[in-house]
Image (cartoon, grey):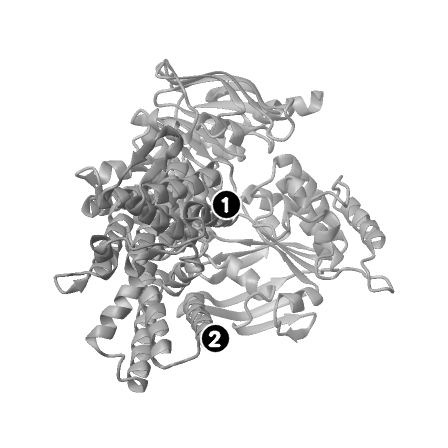
Amino acid sequence: MTAIQRNNTINLARLQSVIALVVLCTIIAILSDKFLTMDNGWNVLRQIAVNICISVGMTLIVLTAGIDLSVGSILALCGAITAGLLKNGIKLPSADLFIGFTLLGALLGGIIVGSLLGWFNGFVITKFKVPPFVGTLAMLTIARGLTMLWTQGHPISNLGPSFATIGTGWLLGIPVPVWIAGIVVLLAVFITRQTRLGRYIYAIGGNENAAILSGININKVKLIVYSIAGALAAVGGIMVTSRLDSAQPNAGTGYELDAIAAVVIGGTSLSGGKGSIGGTVMGAVIIGVLNNGLVLLNVSPFWQQVVKGAVILIAVIIDKGGNKK
Amino acid sequence: MLIAQNITKKFAGVTALNKVNLELHPGKVNAIIGENGAGKSTLMKVLSGVYTDYEGTIIYNNEPLKLTGTKDAEAKGIVIIHQELNLVPGLSITENIFLGRECCNVMGMLDKKEMAQETRTLLQKVKLDADPGQLVGSLKVGQQQLVEIAKALHTKANVIIMDEPTSAISDKEVDNLFVIINELRSEGKTIVYISHKLKELFTIADRFVVMRDGCSVESGVMAEMTQDELIRKMTGRAVNGTTSAATQTFTEPVLRVQNINLKSASRHKTNVLTDISFTLHKGEIVGLYGLMGAGRTELMETLFGMHPKRASGNIFVNEKAVQVQSPIQAIDQGIALVPEDRKAHGLILDQKIKTNISITVLNQLEKWGIVLYNKKETQLSKEYIQQLGIKTYSENNLAGNLSGGNQQKIVLAKWLATNPSILLLDEPTRGIDINARFEIYNLMKKLASGGMAILLVSSELPEILTASHRVLVMAEGRLTANIPIAEATESNILKHAIQHNITA
């Protein structure tokens, strides 16, 4: 009996976010004739793509009852590393060494650094039992500092047309970032629903002690999850850098909060074990549409932040109300 | 006197209590008896102000009573001590007792001296030898329970409801609890006592109310009842008690442990387990008895690889020396552990029955080495639901929605799925009703006759005597006896269980 009700409330929560999105779109469309155009649609999706990549990684972590505050900084560092490798390669004047990078090599370099930093987050959390909030807070500062060191505080720009394709190009009539985000989402949905790793992620968040006793190597699972989140932050960093044709040292500041907001609006429980990638995608879309609408409606940037915060709050309160029953 | 008349309570259309009538007499211990799901807890929550939306009337000291909440109940002298204790482990005994009603001096500051003094008096009354400043988290469960009682006394409670007060404490602590209950009774307090342990009820209770399927079936004086009659009234049918089979001999060792030692986590020089050696044979059920703190659970955990850093000793599976440094390695050796606390360590309550059962064997449910084979998973869980008689309409029901007995069967199912040769059961029947209990005993027999070796930890002597082929007794971290079932009696097992306590 209760299970049927529970399932209904889950569906209802899904429905709620869909309704919220429809209402939001309707209001904006009435107030602005630019909103419902193809151009604007692709624009919104392209902007959301970065947040979706980060939010997907964040969802996996939150499902294990963790959190990752460092994704914004990792995004900046990896974007800068890719840009730097592509443009300047690695020079060691003392050893008279120069390594140049192809586009693919530079991309891989950024993503590998991202997953290593994520792995390090996981290592600190599992090995030294540092709470994820604290461990990743430290990484937030460390990665930002490393970004400053790598860029010497200056943007790395003019990265060439082929690199720019990643952020601005089109493939089969769909922007490349949307392709990337779509693939990331599909992979994550597959992992969470159809693989052992996915089950273990939910099990750890649902009851860590029971997971340990069931023979799950929870440290390994956490290491994998934090590494994935780091790698996805790097992918986001590459997309941001490519779109601007420039790696900004202060890129991605506050992105972790947008990602957490998307996760929470999407109905994933911060205490772990409950939630879905689909929910997070909805959350990210709602935030993206809201951002876009506020800009189209010429709302002052200061008010934009107030409105965004209020929407997050309302979404979570409605979600709680649904859970209580 | 507290009288409840025609109490009906519904949850979303499901009737949990159906016109229940109840009379609680002051100066008496009133036992509420019934299987799990009979409505005992719901009724107690109505009486203690947790649920306020019920139909029917409650009359307390000849006046109608309509509680607005638990605070209101407390103010009127009705206090409930839950099965899961409601104390804050990080606060001291005094702070817990005075939580929410702290004494202040004229300056508006906490009057610590006064509170500590009062606490000392209360602790004396409940015979707890502890300092008022001691953290509650450092006390044993039995001691924490006494703090709860002290807290109830402090609020000047007249009606004290105890929900399964002995489910987690040793026999010695039970005796102490009974002494305190006797004193409270002689002071004219109304005690409500809920327990599955019938033997206890015959010792302590004056009156009884039997509940079944949300109704109060019968009430009366305890002394006029027999155990069999009570069981019949609870279940609505006679239970065929199974007694242990004739003595069998077992020769093929499956698990042999040698000189297991476990260091204490807090005090490094002391041992929690000392020189434990025994053998478990194929097809044999060995009962392991010990008082609270004897180290039974710690032994099970050590055998399951949960204390790799503190444990030492040799473990042989099928006469081959093996390393058991983690649950993963233990599972690889064919060992399975059904833990003591199924909610905290056994199940993921928010997830489906199916997911809970398959979690231990997901690697066998994959195709192409990566994708979960959902059909196989559903099939597996359906098999176990049927085999163990788990009562649910679907394998997609959430584990948390089931009763204690059915939850325990899910934990059993997830371990049986690993096809273990050694099954460690830690208090497998705690808090579950009589029928489910016998189902679990029968299941153990079936598994043993199929060749499984079972180590059964229990704090209930009748359970040990009913289910085992052989009895091991522990006291203070040592094995003190190894008794064939034919020679085992409650008194000689108990003698070995307290032996060390006497000499120490």
User: Which residue shows up at 40% across the image and 57% down it?
Assistant: A251
Could you say where residue B331 lies in the image, as x and y percent from the top left? 36, 29
Could you say where residue B214 lies in the image, as x and y percent from the top left? 46, 62
Query: Which of the pair A62/A290 is nearer the observer?
Result: A290
Q: Is residue B167 left or right of residue A293?
A: right
Chain for numbered disc 1:
A
To which residue does mark 2 refer?
A: A302
Chain for numbered disc 2:
A
Instruction: Give, as a three-letter code, the residue at label 1.
Output: Gly
Name the image quarter holding residue A183.
Answer: bottom left
Give the position of the N terminus of chain B as an image quadrant. bottom right
Q: Is residue B44 left or right of residue B186?
A: left
To which residue does mark 1 refer?
A: A135
Residue B7: numbered disc: none
The residue sitting at the right extreme is B106
Could you say where residue B177 lies in the image, as x and y percent from the top left? 68, 43
Give the position of the C terminus of chain B as an image quadrant. top right
Instruction: Give, as a three-letter code, the residue at label 2.
Output: Phe
